[in-house]
Image (tube, grey):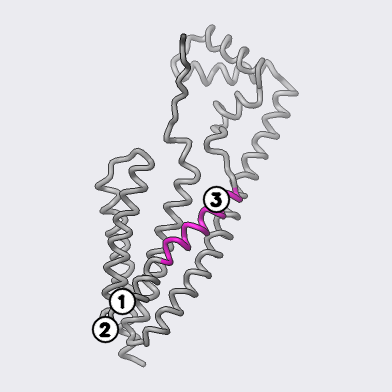
Amino acid sequence: MNHRQQERHLINRIGWLRAAVLGANDGIISTASLMVGVATAATPSGTVLITGIAGLVAGSMSMAAGEYVSVSSQADTERADLARESRELAADRGAEVKELADIYVGRGVEPVLAVQVAEQLMAKDALAAHARDELGVSEAISANPVQAALTSAATFASGAILPILAAFFSPKGILAATVFGVSLVVLAALGAIGARAGGAEILKPTIRVAFWGAIAMAVTAGVGALIGKGV
């Protein structure tokens, strides 16, 4: 008996993976940077925690709204392109067959076979064939605004809570250093997890995420220290 094995490709993860990694990274870096900056300004630990919580709430809402608007714009563009393609199919199907066949010829298919493939695919679902091969729109990468917004908000909050917890349990006098160190370790781990989930090499993404996170926190700490001396 022949068993059909369905392959699972990593490209199917690209939509939610991008939003998840972006949200968690931003949650950790922005919240930790805020807290480290406020802490180095010689601010009481209670104020640092309030700053972190405010950053978590504001950042989650901002990420959700921004991602929803951005991905909605992408979805609007996809719908407009599909509507135009549908009109072109209704107006001149023969030209659309040739257009699709030319795409296959450009990929190395013989002209006669390319026409046959285009006709057969269009006989099944003409709009889907053109959406996939002409416009580059498929189910795997199609814009989903609600999914992207919810994922960004949730992952931002899950990332932002970590430096807050680090500050809450930090010994007195080393709050800024604790938040910095814990956040850096988590960022490195997140970079490795994101690379592994996407099927990429692990070392470079891990170093990249940790490096830029350290830069962001260090710069904010410097600004906080300068402001603390001046007020």
Secondary structure character of the magenta stretch overall = helix
Residue 63 percent coordinates (x, y): 52, 60
Name the amino acid, label 2.
Gly
Rounded to the nearest whole Å, what is the CA distance between mark 3 and mark 2?
39 Å
Location of residue 63 with respect to 93 vertically, above or below: below
Rounded to the nearest whole Å, what is the CA distance between mark 1 and mark 2?
8 Å
Q: Which residue lies furthest to the front in this view?
A: 1
Q: Do the residues labelled 1 and 2 touch (CB within 8 Å)?
A: no
Residue closest to the eye, 201 or 96: 201
Residue at mark 1? 170
Residue 62 percent coordinates (x, y): 54, 64
Q: Which of marks 1 and 2 is in front?
A: 1
Residue at mark 2? 173
Name the amino acid, label 1.
Ser
Q: Which of marks 3 and 1 is in front?
A: 1
Residue 55 percent coordinates (x, y): 47, 72
The tag on residue 219 is none
Residue 89 percent coordinates (x, y): 70, 23
Residue closest to the eye, 83 or 57: 57
Q: How many numbered marks, from 0 up?
A: 3
Name the amino acid, label 3.
Ala
**Residue shown at 32%/58% (left/top)?**
187
Location of residue 108 with respect to 145 vertically, above or below: above
Q: Magenta span covers which residues?
A: 145-161
Q: In the picture, residue 8 is in which quadrant? A: top left
